[in-house]
């Protein structure tokens, strides 16, 4: 990381992955659709959209009932992620402006982390496919926390890993529960309307259609309002 001005090392950016760095929604739907056929349970596209961003355990218990055995939940969840990785490999592309903003923030010396509810294997695959594996100071995933978003646990842990207080962190999110988690963590939030309409993301400090329009100065302004 390059030498930075003093004020640059006092804040950090925490990135969600799905819907922020990459548009993986079609691949997740492909995986869930195939899994539902294999396992013989109904799942409509409306079900998928309603539960997108939830943890697999939450989705499966919502669809199959709260009494489904833990072992079955784990088996189905593992199979879904295997189908997802098969679908995404060699086909993933970054969302407009994401890599450019990531690199500009890195050049400015801003500490950055992935804070995603995805399994670690999924995150590692995406970062490798995009060629940005070394651009983050920390990577936190589903396995690092006990509670998923909207609980703020993953963002608070990410801030701790980076050595930056929550009030000096900006979260970049696309999901309603992610925005809620950022607010509960006491962090600023920038929302992108990749997977949800702007009205559903109104708790964020700012909502944009694309990261193309976001600059390093915009990030600084959101973390240090006024």
Image (tube, helix red, strand yellow):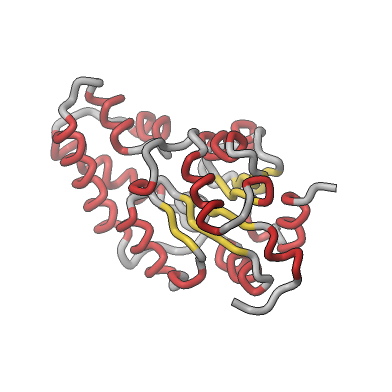
Residue 45's place in the image compared with 188, above or below, is above
**Quarter location, residue 197:** top right
174 horizontally vs 187: left or right: left
Residue 160 at x, y percent in the picture: 53, 52
Q: Which of 24 and 60 is in front in this view?
A: 60
Residue 130's place in the image compared with 55, above or below, is below
Residue name at image x 64 percent, y 65 percent: 110
**Quarter location, residue 219:** bottom right
Residue name at image x 39 percent, y 51 percent: 141
Q: Which of 167 and 39 is in front in this view?
A: 167
Residue 88 at x, y percent in the picture: 32, 59
Residue 120 at x, y percent in the picture: 33, 55
Residue name at image x 68 percent, y 65 percent: 9
**Quarter location, residue 40:** top left
Residue name at image x 76 percent, y 64 percent: 7
Which residue is at the far right? 226
Total tally of numbered discs in the picture: 0
19 horizontally vs 36: left or right: right
Which residue is at the far bottom? 2
Residue 97's place in the image compared with 76, above or below, is below
Residue 65's place in the image compared with 193, above or below, is above
Q: Nearer the viewer, residue 207 or 170?
A: 170
Q: Nearer the viewer, residue 46 or 124?
A: 124
The quadrant the N terminus occupies is bottom right
56 horizontally vs 203: left or right: left
Residue 19 at x, y percent in the picture: 49, 49
């Amino acid at each position: 990381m390059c030498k930075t001005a003093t004020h640059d090392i006092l804040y950090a950016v925490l990135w969600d992955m799905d819907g922020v760095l990459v548009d993986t929604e079609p691949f997740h739907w492909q995986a869930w659709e195939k899994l539902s056929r294999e396992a013989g349970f109904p799942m409509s596209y409306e079900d998928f959209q309603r539960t997108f961003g939830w943890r697999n355990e939450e989705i499966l218990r919502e669809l199959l009932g709260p009494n489904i055995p833990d072992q079955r939940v784990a088996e189905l969840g593992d199979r879904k992620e295997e189908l997802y990785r098969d679908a995404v490999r060699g086909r993933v592309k970054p969302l407009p402006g994401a890599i450019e903003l990531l690199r500009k923030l890195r050049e400015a010396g801003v500490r950055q982390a992935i804070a995603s509810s995805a399994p670690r294997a999924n995150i590692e695959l995406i970062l490798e496919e995009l060629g940005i594996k070394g651009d983050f100071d920390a990577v936190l995933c589903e396995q690092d926390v006990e509670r998923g978003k909207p609980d703020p646990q993953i963002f608070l842990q990410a801030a701790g890993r980076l050595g930056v207080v929550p009030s000096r962190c900006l979260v970049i999110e696309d999901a309603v529960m992610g925005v809620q988690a950022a607010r509960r963590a006491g962090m600023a939030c920038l929302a992108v309307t990749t997977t949800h309409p702007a009205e559903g993301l109104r708790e964020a400090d700012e909502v944009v259609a694309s990261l193309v329009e976001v600059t390093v100065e915009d990030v600084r302004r959101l973390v240090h309002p006024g």
